[in-house]
Amino acid sequence: MGEKGFQLFPEAASSIAGQVDALYAYMVLVSAFFTLLIAFLVVFLAIKYRRKNDIIPKPVDEHSVGGMVLEIVWSIIPLGLSLIMFAWGASIFFTESRPPADAMEIFVVGKQWMWKVQHNEGAREINELHIPVNRDIRLTLTSEDVIHDFAVPAFRTKTDVLPGRYTTEWFRPTKVGQYHLFCMEYCGTKHSGMIGTVYVMNEADYDAWLGAGSGEGSVPGAAFEEHLMQIAFELANDLADRGLGAVQPLGGTGEAFFFGYCEKGLEMMNIHKAGAPTFSAYCTTISRFYRFKKNNKFDLWLQIRENKDISEG
């Protein structure tokens, strides 16, 4: 995902990408050929058979053998080309609809306006997806609110993410690198900001990332603190959406900013007795995600989750 200059098409970085590109190229070439052919014939025949004052055109024999053959030919050829498109597209569709039985399972939840990712090993991510190269990956997706669409152009895959239902998307990344992740279904005012990054890593690097703890391994240093502040702002938007007003967090950056916001937010939630389950779940998830076990706030999040006065409010 680095600077590569102008690209007409995104990089092909999955096992299915070549097949999709080939079908697309075939459809473009067929469409271009017939567009140019028809345009040429329209102009050529309009000039050749234009009306002339000194020539009386001969009547057309509607039952001529040549006319019938011509009609059959210009019907059969487009039909055959269209059936090739159908069969080719159906083959790709069935391939993309049937993930391999031994594919790595990852769960994804879409929510205005973020992607939440859960690995089977326990690692969790927000707006990021770390996966090993040359491994079949199966995503099980659902939405907490409205219809979203999980799309990675470099993999040539996209799948609707629906509330109340589970959908599946799978791919096999073939190139190490960073690739854009988009929501391709309009989902509200901040739809354009529902983006992320897919990190395709070597097997050894992926195992090291997984063992180091997802958040700390993927967003080190200053970027880690900046990411925390971004999450705090996202939580603030969630509060505002629930009509509880703006929450002013305590001062500081990174960790202090995030925990300060949580303290203020939980205080307000306890007063209003509204929306607490979602908010406390966020706190618990993010705390575990970043493995703040050494921070004395970690126990607080566990207590909040068990606090029936808050969670049932």
Image (cartoon, helix red, strand yellow):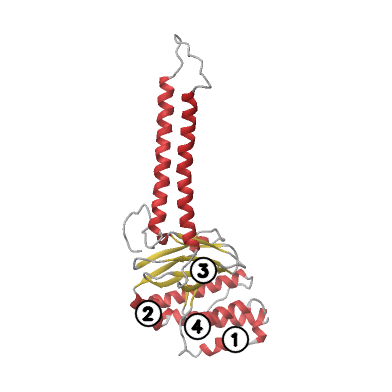
Q: Which three-letter amino acid code belongs to the residue tagged 4?
A: Ser
Q: How crowded is mark 3: few (under 14 residues within 10 Å), some or many (20 or more)?
A: many
Label 1 to label 3, Cα distance in Å? 23 Å
x and y percent of residue 103 in the render? 45, 72
Q: Are marks 1 and 3 in contact (CB under 8 Å)?
A: no
Q: Are marks 2 and 1 in contact (CB under 8 Å)?
A: no
Please report whichever mark, 4 or 2, sits nearer to the chain's N-terminal start.
2
Q: Give the residue at mark 2.
A: 207
Q: State left or right for residue 68 relative to residue 277.
A: left
Q: State left or right for residue 55 relative to residue 244.
A: left
Secondary element at image label 2: helix
Secondary element at image label 3: strand
Please report whichever mark, 1 or 3, sits nearer to the chain's N-terminal start.
3
Q: Which of marks 2 and 1 is in front?
A: 2
Q: Can residue 216 be seen in this view?
A: yes
Secondary element at image label 4: helix
Q: Give the residue at mark 4.
A: 287
Q: Residues within 10 Å of mark 4 (few under 14, many from 20)?
A: many
Label 2 to label 1, Cα distance in Å? 32 Å
Q: Give the residue at mark 3.
A: 114
Q: Are marks 3 and 2 in contact (CB under 8 Å)?
A: no
Label 1 to label 4, Cα distance in Å? 12 Å
Q: Give the residue at mark 1.
A: 304
Frontmost residue, 241 versus 184: 184
Label 4 to label 3, Cα distance in Å? 17 Å
Q: Residues within 10 Å of mark 2 (few under 14, many from 20)?
A: few
Label 4 to label 2, Cα distance in Å? 22 Å
The quarter of the rendered structure image containing the N terminus is bottom left
